[in-house]
Image: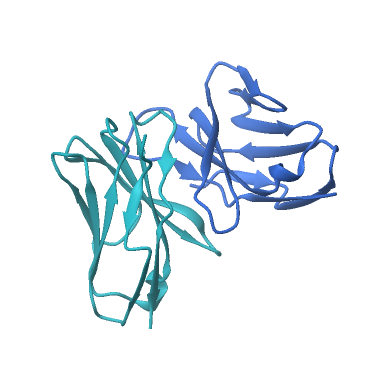
Chain colours: A blue, B cyan
Amino acid sequence: QQPVQSPQAVILREGEDAVINCSSSKALYSVHWYRQKHGEAPIFLMILLKGGEQKGHDKISASFNEKKQQSSLYLTASQLSYSGTYFCGTLYSGGGADGLTFGKGTHLIIQP
Amino acid sequence: KAGVTQTPRYLIKTRGQQVTLSCSPISGHRSVSWYQQTPGQGLQFLFEYFSETQRNKGNFPGRFSGRQFSNSRSEMNVSTLELGDSALYLCASSLGRNQPQHFGDGTRLSIL
């Protein structure tokens, strides 16, 4: 079952902040975040393991709330280069034969 | 360090034919995953191979199959092609299941 991402799309001005959420109905082991620009391959941003940790580099950070089975990606003081589609991918607790299950993506447009 | 290489970049086939796609992972990466990307469904996991063994499998029909060779290169085969198989097929390599995945540029398959 796919995780649910929200919002589906967001338009910001350069310098504004954005939050992208990823929710699952199943117990999560880890959450992976990727960004894909049009016509390009997805690129890795970060992985969060269960334990409620928060990670980040530069002005992009993320949190993982294990109790709520939810992760949020925070983009602070957005830059034009942040434009693209953001995907969360989830691995579920309990093992099993599932690979990384991606949400449908959040389209982020940064305007000058 | 060379990235993930997928060949061919574009393919046009007709219904009923079969197709084989190739993926060369980053040197040292033993895990190779395949994904189907379409505008409606997003990124969907097909299968993952690790050390020549299929370790995980997504919810796709048996027409979709794959294999991995001793040098970690992987191939994906789709038999009896259907119009709905038109998509971008992405391959990603990593050091393991819960490690960052490095995506290739994909093979765009069009079925006429």
Count of marks placed on residues:
0
Question: Would you place residue B27 above or below residue A10 in this image?
Answer: above
Question: Would you place residue B67 above or below residue B29 in this image?
Answer: below
Position of residue A44 measured from the top left corner of the image (x, y, whole percent):
52, 36
Position of residue B2 measured from the top left corner of the image (x, y, whole percent):
36, 39
Instruction: Pick the residue in front: A108 or B45.
Output: A108
Residue at the image position 35 percent from the left and 54 percent from the top? B59
Left or right: residue A40 compared with residue A21: left
Instruction: Pick the residue in front: B34 or B44.
Output: B34
Question: Would you place residue A16 above or below residue B28 in this image?
Answer: below
Position of residue A19 measured from the top left corner of the image (x, y, whole percent):
75, 36
Position of residue B43 measured from the top left corner of the image (x, y, whole percent):
48, 53
Left or right: residue B101 compared with residue A78: left
Left or right: residue A103 compared with residue A80: left
Q: Residue furthest front?
A: B1
Q: Based on the displayed image, in which of its 4 quarters is residue A56 positioned?
A: top right
Instruction: Pick the residue in front: A57 or A49.
Output: A57
Question: Would you place residue B7 above or below residue B2 in this image?
Answer: below
Q: Residue furthest left?
A: B70
Residue at the image position 85 percent from the left and 37 percent from the top? A15
Residue at the image position 73 percent from the left and 53 percent from the top? A9
